[in-house]
Each structure stands twice: as structure tokens, then as C-alpha cells.
Image (cartoon, rainbow, N blue to C red):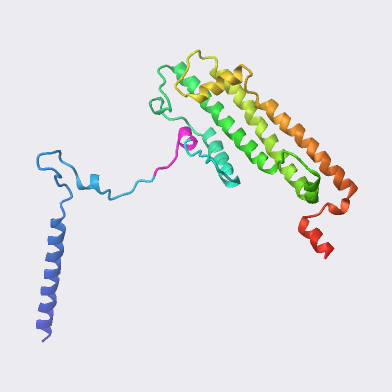
């Protein structure tokens, strides 16, 4: 009885292994999709391993920069993060640059233009963040939220000041790129370089103007809070007090 059971098990295993082997041989991993056409491996059509793209070079992180028409704080902070990382990375091989460079001097200009542009993009992102905490005008009815305005203006001022060093670096790189009298196929980046060195584009003056206006608005708020110190609290806290 035991011997018959053992024989049955062996027979079933042999049949299973045969069917599995037949199933494997039915899959042609190196088939011809056209009888008279080129020879193509199955793996070229259906990849058996997914390769994840990992940013490595300056251009890789720069290409992660993205700004929608309608953006929020997180998107701006994310762009600043990627762009700052890119400044510490190596450039791609010259043949994989974002534009064609034929000489070492052109590649030198390309690198300085990229540094210039990335610093400008970081500066712009900080200014955009600052604008979200700034307020163009302070009207009398806005002073009902004087405490919130005071805190918001403080954040805006810090972002404006954070943008200044990146503008200074962008100017230095623009001057270095301007030493090479050849225009690269980088479109608006070359235009940025020209406008910076000619003084047509001066974000230093723009930032200082924003800071001066911000000082005026901060003065209005501080004078109001000095006159009504009890208003220097969050609006919800003031509502609780009145109740």
C-alpha cells in the first residue's frame, strides 16, 4: 500500500515538472516580431527590470525645477531645495550639456551662465515666498489684524534678505560669463546675462525697494499697536476676550 502511494506521488511530481518545463519552453524570450525583419529580444519589448532615474549632476537637479502658473509655498521651497543641491554638484560631460559648446572657453561660459541662472532662480523663489507674506497696501480696516500683520511682515523681511546673497552671486557669475565674447544657445539665460552686466536688470534695487516699502507698512502697524497694545494678540484670542 505504501509502495503504491509512493509511486503515485512520484508520478504526479514528474507530470508537474514536465508541464512546468513545457510552459517555460513555450515562452520565446528572443522571438522575431517580423519574419523578415530585425531580430528583437523579448526583454526589449517588455523590460524585466525597471531602472529608476537618479539625479546626479548639476543639470539633473536643475531640471527638477518646476513652477506652475498657480503655486504654493511648498512648491517654492521644493524648488529652492533642488536648486541649492544643484550648486554643489558636478556638471555633466560637455557633450551632454544643455547646449552645444565647441571650445573650452564656451564651456567655461556655459558653467558660469548656469551658476548665474540658478542663483537667480533661487533669488526669485525667495522673493515669491516673501510676496506671499507681504501686503501691497495696509488699509485702516487691515489693522484689525495688526498682530498677524506684524508677524507676516517679519517673515517677508527675512525672505527678502535671504534673496540678496544669491543676487550678488548671480552678478559675479554674469561678469565672468561676459568675459567670453560668444553667445551660447541658452535663450533667455544669455538675455539675463546681458541685462545684468548692462545694469538693465537690477534685482538689488528691486529688493531694497520692497524692503523700504515693507518698513513703511511695519511702521504703520507698530504705531497702531503702540496706541492699542491690547490689540497685539491673535484675532481669535481677542474674540475670546470679548466673550
Residue 88 visible? The answer is no
- Viewer-proximal residue among 123 and 230: 230
Is residue 16 covered in magenta?
A: no
Q: Is residue 72 above or below residue 165?
A: below
User: Where residue 152 sits: x, y (%)?
Assistant: 73, 45
> Which residue is located at x 42 percent, y 42 percent?
54
In the picture shown, does residue 112 fall above or below 70? above
Looking at the image, the residue that sits furthest to the top is 181
Q: From the viewer's perspective, is 92 left or right of 164?
A: left
Q: Which residue sits furthest bottom?
A: 1
Q: Which residues are magenta?
A: 53-62
Q: Give residue 34's position: percent from left, percent from top.
A: 13, 43
Q: Quadrant of residue 207?
A: top right
Q: Quadrant of the N terminus?
A: bottom left
Q: Using residue 9 as the reference point, say whether residue 229 is left or right of it.
A: right
The residue depicted at 43 percent of the width and 28 percent of the height is 98
For image coordinates 60% across by 18% down, the residue present is: 197
Q: Please state the horizontal and vertical placement of residue 199, each as a whole percent of the image.
A: 64, 18
Vertical comparison of 22 with 188: above or below: below
Nearest to the observer: residue 104 or residue 242: 242
The tally of labels here is 0
Amino acid at each position: 500500500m505504501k509502495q503504491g502511494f509512493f509511486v503515485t506521488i512520484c508520478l504526479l511530481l514528474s507530470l508537474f515538472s514536465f508541464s512546468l518545463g513545457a510552459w517555460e519552453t513555450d515562452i520565446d524570450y528572443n522571438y522575431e516580431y517580423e519574419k523578415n525583419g530585425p531580430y528583437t529580444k523579448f526583454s526589449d519589448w517588455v523590460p524585466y527590470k525597471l531602472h529608476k532615474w537618479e539625479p546626479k549632476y548639476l543639470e539633473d537637479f536643475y531640471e527638477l525645477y518646476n513652477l506652475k502658473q498657480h503655486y504654493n509655498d511648498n512648491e517654492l521651497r521644493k524648488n529652492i531645495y533642488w536648486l541649492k543641491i544643484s550648486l554643489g554638484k558636478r556638471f555633466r560631460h560637455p557633450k551632454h550639456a544643455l547646449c552645444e559648446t565647441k571650445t573650452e572657453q564656451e564651456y567655461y561660459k556655459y558653467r558660469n551662465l548656469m551658476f548665474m541662472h540658478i542663483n537667480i532662480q533661487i533669488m526669485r523663489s525667495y522673493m515669491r515666498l516673501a510676496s506671499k507674506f507681504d501686503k501691497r497696501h495696509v488699509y485702516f480696516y487691515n489693522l484689525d489684524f495688526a498682530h498677524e500683520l506684524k508677524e507676516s511682515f517679519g517673515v517677508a523681511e527675512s525672505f527678502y534678505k535671504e534673496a540678496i546673497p544669491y543676487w550678488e552671486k548671480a552678478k559675479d557669475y554674469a561678469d565672468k560669463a561676459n568675459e567670453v565674447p560668444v553667445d551660447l544657445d541658452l535663450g533667455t539665460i544669455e538675455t539675463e546675462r546681458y541685462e545684468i552686466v548692462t545694469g538693465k536688470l537690477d534685482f538689488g534695487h528691486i529688493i531694497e525697494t520692497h524692503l523700504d516699502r515693507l518698513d513703511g507698512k511695519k511702521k504703520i502697524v507698530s504705531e497702531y499697536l503702540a496706541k492699542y497694545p491690547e490689540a497685539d494678540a491673535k484675532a481669535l484670542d481677542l474674540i475670546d476676550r470679548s466673550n
